[in-house]
Image (cartoon, helix red, strand yellow):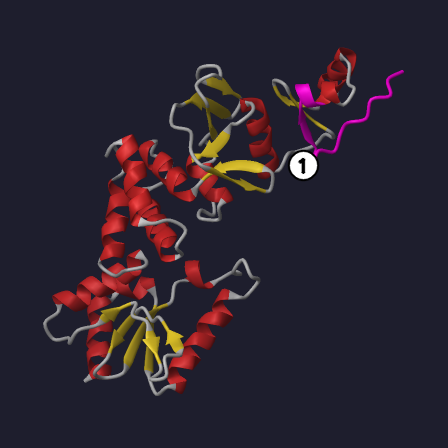
Amino acid sequence: MTTFVFPDIPGQMGLASTRQLLKAGASEWDLTQLALRGQRVVRAVYRSGTGQLTPRQLLIAGSLWAGDHAVLTGGHALVVHGLLDDLDPLARPRYLVPPQHRARRNAVGMVSERTRNMPRHQLVEGLRVARPDRALVDAAVRREVTDSRLKMITMTLLQRRRTTLERLADEIGVHGDANTGPVQDGMLAFTAGAWSPPEEVLINAIRADGRFPTMDANPVLERTDGRFIGTPDGYFADSGVIVQVHSKRFHTGEEPTGEDRFARTLARDTDYQAYGLVVVGVAPETLDHDLPGFLSNLLLIIA
């Protein structure tokens, strides 16, 4: 009778490779029994129990299957980084491995590819994941994410200082321009002052409308003593009017610190009002469907 006990390896959520199991004392007979009980996830990867695996467990299983030094990239890496809420169910997790590994391999629902350009990575809950900028460009090249989402994620990364224009340009330079147009569009929009696609719509509309004075995009506002007030989406300095684009996507949920995003948004709007500034809020849907009407109302407010 076997005395083998499935190891609980930190960060692997009840999963282990054949090599890890053999090291923990499993025999070939033990591995066969695990497979017969439905505990083999994919070739050379097993789980401690049965039942449906979570999406994160499947990604960890893929990493173990792909082998040492495998790094998750593309759309699934963006999900792990919290930059995408979901992905096409048919999209397969893609792992990059060094040249000494086997050539491109496929398993049920996952793929590994050799590359001489291994990405710098981060360890996220036990999973090796390509940095956001590399994952973004890989997702663009393979068309794993829609153009609109690619542009939005590009601007979000830059706004949150999780990458730089230079690093994105370097990644694009390595891969070439193929399918990276949405990423480059996001970079250009950010350079022009916008931190999100809805802000870009607002900024371009104001600049193209000769009725409006200059609106500063995402300026840093400070008190006369240098204390920070805030960074509004748009600011008409002469009239003391602030425009805030309130998006459900960016203003719901929690920050990594645990702070509620919507509560923080309301608090910041109140802070502006405390300094005598007029806050005008607008939803992205309004900019998409009733931009002329919003501009007319805004013009009355700043007049």
Image vertical order of residue 203 relative to residue 274, above or below: above
Quadrant where the C terminus sits is bottom left
What type of secondary structure mainly makes up the magenta span?
loop
* The image quarter in which residue 23 lies: top right
Q: Going by the image, does 110 lie left or right of 50?
A: left
Q: Which residue is mark 1?
A: 13
Residue furthest to the front? 225
Hey, which quadrant is residue 28 in on the image? top right
- x, y percentage for residue 7? 76, 29
- Which residue is nearer to you in this view: 197 or 215? 215
**Residue 179 appears in the rendering:** no
Q: For this view, does 257 lie left or right of residue 271?
A: right
What residue type is disc 1 on?
Answer: Met
* Residue at position x 37%, y 36% in the image: 139
Query: Is residue 52 shown above or below 162?
Result: above
When the figure is inspected, residue 170 is found, relative to residue 256, above or below; the finding is: above
202 or 228, which lies in front? 228
The span shown in magenta is 1-20
Please check the rendered image and state whether residue 242 is part of the magenta-colored stretch, yes or no. no
Secondary structure of the residue carrying tag 1 is loop
Mark 1 neighbour class, 10 Å CA radius: few under 14, some 14 to 19, many 20 or more? some
For the N terminus, the quadrant is: top right
- The answer to which quarter of the image holds residue 47 is top right
Residue 11, magenta (yes or no): yes
Residue at (37, 83) in percent of width and height: 225
Q: Where residue 219 appears, x then y in whole percent?
A: 29, 70
Task: Give residue 49's position: percent from left, percent from top.
Answer: 74, 30
Above or below, 57 against 248 in this view is above
Q: Is residue 34 left or right of residue 270?
A: right
Question: In the current view of this chain or complex, which residue is farthest to the left?
Answer: 210
> Where does residue 42 sit, x and y in percent of width and height?
60, 21
